[in-house]
Amino acid sequence: MNTQKAKRIVVKVGSSLVTNNGEGLDHAAIAMWADQMAALLADGHEVLMVSSGAIAEGMQRLGWTKRPTEIHQLQAAAAVGQMGLVQVYESCFARFNLRSAQVLLTNADLADAERNANAKATLDTLLKLGVVPIINENDTVVTDEIKFGDNDSLAALVTNLIHADLLIILTDQGGLYTADPRQDASATLLSDATSGDPALEKMAGGAASQLSKGGMLTKVLAAKVAALTGADTVIASGHEPQVLTRLMCGEKIGTCLTAG
C-alpha cells in the first residue's frame, strides 16, 4: 500500500475518541486532527471526515450513563449532542484556517439514485473548494429499518460514493490484532492484510464499549466495502502522534488492508 499516492481521503473517528471515552468532547484531540488535516490539504490531498460522537455527547449533556435502546431516546440524544459536536469542530478547524461543513446522511440518501448523485455532487464541490466535510448519520430522523448500523459502514459507503483512494479508520486500538489485546496478552498486531479475507472477520470482535455500536468487526467489514471501488483502508490508533501526516508520508502505522 502506497498511502502517499492517495489523493482523496476519508478519515473516520469513533465516539470513544471524539468524546474521550464519554467524558465530553475532546477539544484537544479534535484540534490535533484538524492540524494534521490542514497539513494534508496543504500537500494537495482532499480530506473528508466521518465523525461519530453526537449520541455520546448528547448522553453526556443529558446526564445519561448508559446508552439507551429506545430509538426516540437515541434520536433525542443525537439532536442535543449534534449542537456541541458541530460547535467544537468548527472552532477547532477555524484555528488552522480550515473551513468545515456539516453533512448529515441516511441510508435512503445513498440508496436513491437522484439523492445519491446530489450527495456526491455536493461533496465533490466542497472538496474542490478546500472545505472539510464533517459527515455523520442523520440520527435524529433515522429508524432501525434504515440505519447504516454504525459510522464505519457509513465511512465505507461514503468512500465508494466519492471514489476516495484511502479510508483511514481511527480507533482507540492500535489496529487489528489476532485477538482482543485487552483480554489476551499473546495477541499480536496485524501489519498487513487483504480486505475481504474471511479470516479477518473471525479475528474481529463486537462493540468496544457502550458508547458506540461499532467494533473491530465493523471496521473489517467497512474495509471490505471500501475495496469495492478500489480503496485501501488503514485501521490505526487516533492517539498515535501525528498519525495522519505520518501515514501520508508512507509510514506504516496500525493495520493496512489492501484492496484485493
Image: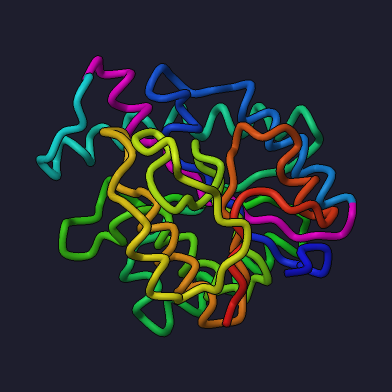
Residue farthest to the left, as pictured = 70
Number of on-image labels: 0
Q: Is residue 52 magenta?
A: yes
Tell me where the magenta segment starts and ends, as one range: 43-64
Seen in the image, is 93 located left or right of residue 195? right
**Residue at (67% x, 50% y) in the render:** 132
- The quarter of the picture where the C terminus appears is bottom right
Q: Nearer the viewer, residue 23 or 182?
A: 182
Residue at 37% in and 27% down: 57
Q: Residue furthest front?
A: 186
- Pick the front one: 148 or 90: 148
Residue depicted at 35% across the width and 80% down the height: 112
Q: Quadrant of residue 3?
A: bottom right
Residue 5 x/y as whole percent: 82, 69
- For this orientation, the residue located farthest to the right is 43
- Residue 201 x, y percent position in the rendering: 36, 65
> Residue 120 placed where, x, y %?
56, 73
Q: Is residue 125 visible?
A: yes
Is residue 147 highlighted in magenta?
no
